[in-house]
Image: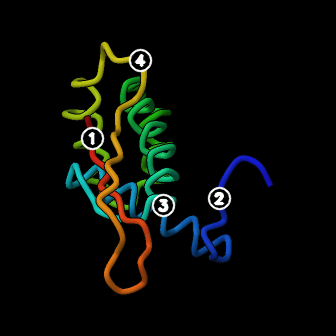
Amino acid sequence: MAGYRKLGRPTNQRKLMLRNLTTALLEKGQIETTVTRAKEVKRMTDKMVTLGKKGDLHARRRALAYITKEDVVTHLFEEIAPKYEDRQGGYTRIYRIGPRRGDAAEVAVIELV
């Protein structure tokens, strides 16, 4: 199935997990997760920053429909998006930091550039 990764979860759990990770990344600027989750979060975070760059009411409502915290949407539209106004894409960066101790899953840090 092309287009997205299933991440070993049912659809509703996967969507909510990605919403929460995207919200946390936009709120904190950097999070630590597995590499496959980081790649999916990168896709959604880039879409949210693009909505923030548009800045109109429709874009704000679309962001509010996805991001779980209202103050994070305000932060996105007022502080994060203007910082990337002249950038054409690539708002996030993924660093691999090695295997996790418990289950040896490949862990990565994803951050806003």
Residue 75 relative to residue 14: left or right: left
Query: Which residue sits at x=34%, y=17%?
Result: 87
Q: Which residue is denoted by mark 3 in the rendering?
A: 37
Residue type at tag 1: Leu
- Give the class, few, some or many, for how many residues have Cα within 10 Å of label 3's Cα (few <14, many ≥20): many
Q: Please, is residue 45 above or below residue 38 in the view? A: above
Q: Which residue is denoted by mark 4 in the rendering?
A: 88
Q: Which circle, 3 or 4, is nearer the viewer?
A: 3
Query: Does label 3 or label 4 sit earlier along the sequence?
Result: 3
The front one of 22 and 78 is 22
Residue type at tag 3: Arg
- Give the class, few, some or many, for how many residues have Cα within 10 Å of label 2's Cα (few <14, many ≥20): few
Residue 18 relative to residue 68: left or right: right
Query: Do the residues bearing badges 2 and 3 touch, measured as CB atoms within 8 Å?
Result: no
Where does residue 35 sit, x and y in percent of width and height? 45, 59
Q: CA distance from mark 1 to mark 2?
A: 22 Å
The front one of 44 and 5 is 5
Q: CA distance from mark 3 to mark 1?
A: 15 Å
Q: CA distance from mark 2 to mark 4?
A: 25 Å
Query: Does label 1 or label 4 sit earlier along the sequence?
Result: 4
Query: Do the residues bearing badges 1 and 2 touch, measured as CB atoms within 8 Å?
Result: no
Q: CA distance from mark 3 to mark 4?
A: 23 Å
Residue type at tag 4: Gln
Where does residue 106 sit, x and y in percent of width and height? 42, 66
Query: Do the residues bearing badges 2 and 4 touch, measured as CB atoms within 8 Å?
Result: no
Q: Secondary structure at mark 1?
A: strand
Q: Which mark is residue 104?
A: none
Q: Which mark is residue 5?
A: 2
Q: Which residue is denoted by mark 1 in the rendering?
A: 112
Query: Does label 2 or label 4 sit earlier along the sequence?
Result: 2
Q: Secondary structure at mark 4?
A: loop
Query: Which residue sits at x=24%, y=34%?
Result: 80
